[in-house]
Every structure is written in structure tokens, then in C-alpha cells.
Image (cartoon, rainbow, N blue to C red):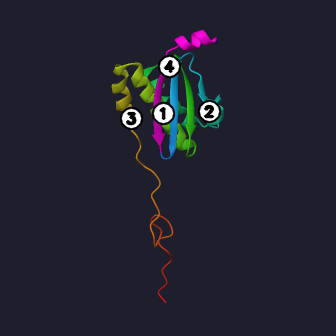
Amino acid sequence: MNSSSQRNTVVYWGTGRRKTSVARVRLIPGTGKITINGRPGDHYLNFNPAYLAAVKAPLQTLGLSDSYDVLVNVYGGGLTGQADAIKQGAARALCELSADNRKPLKIEGHLSRDPRAKERRKYGLKKARKAPQFSKR
């Protein structure tokens, strides 16, 4: 692709978060190719079908899986958090594409930020909730 055609291409942005992962997702009209941090999506996600399904879910909800290329920069956390962050980022980018996309994505739950995160450790305990072993004598 030459530089003049790249400038004319419409790009839709979305940011997704999950646990400590942050994904910046770009949707570009194309063939449905997924690129994550410069690598093919299936390679980056270790060919895990659950992760791949999560990443493709927003596009499949709207039937656009072959219409847009997904370019992702993601950092932080592990693959589970990153896959869900990409899912949310793609859903937000699709909302930018058209306001009509928001309702089906919201019904499927792709726009909701999952609030679950690692609980902090409390003093006097070994972990967040694990107490030290009790000794009676």
C-alpha cells in the first residue's frame, strides 16, 4: 500500500482494558486479518480458540468479521486479560463506525469493562485473604 492510499483510509480507534492489560485497537477496512503487536493474531494468542473467539466476537456479532482488519497494540497482564481488552477495544471502535452498532454490542456484553482484578494484600495476612497458620499452643 502506498502512502497516499494509507492517508485516505478511514481508521476507527478503540481502547479496551481488562485486569492490568490495555489494548489500543484500530479497525481498517480490509479482509479480516488480525495483527497484534506486529504479529499475526493466532500466533500471538498461541492458537488458543477461546482467545481467538473473544477477539473476533464483536466483529462476528455485527457480521463484519471479513470486512475490517484489526490492528492492535496491547501491553500488560497475560493473554486472558489481553484478549478481553482487545475484545472491548474492538467493540468500542465498532461503535465509532456507526451509532447503530452500539445496541447489539451492548446486549452481547462486549462494551462492559470487567471490574474483576487482583485483590490487594492486607497486613497480617499472607495473601489477600489467606491467614497464617493458627497454632493453639
Q: Are marks 4 and 1 in contact (CB under 8 Å)?
A: no
SS for callout 3 = loop
Taking the image as shown, residue 13 lies to the left or right of residue 48, namely: left
- SS class of the residue under badge 2? loop
Residue 87 shows which numbered tag?
1
In this view of the protein, can residue 40 be seen by the observer?
yes
| Element under disc 4 | loop
Which tag is nearer the camera, tag 1 or tag 3? Answer: 1
The reply to whether dot 1 and dot 3 touch (C-beta < 8 Å) is no
Mark nearest the camera among 2 and 1 is 2
Closer to the chain start, of discs 3 and 4, is 4
Residue at figure coordinates x 56%, y 36% from the top left: 74
Residue hosting label 3: 109
Q: Which residue is mark 4?
A: 11
The disc, 1 or 3, on the residue closer to the chain's N-terminal end is 1
Amino acid beneath label 1: Lys
For this rendering, which residue is in front, 58 or 93? Answer: 93
Viewer-side label of 2, 3: 2
Q: Which residues are magenta?
A: 2-18
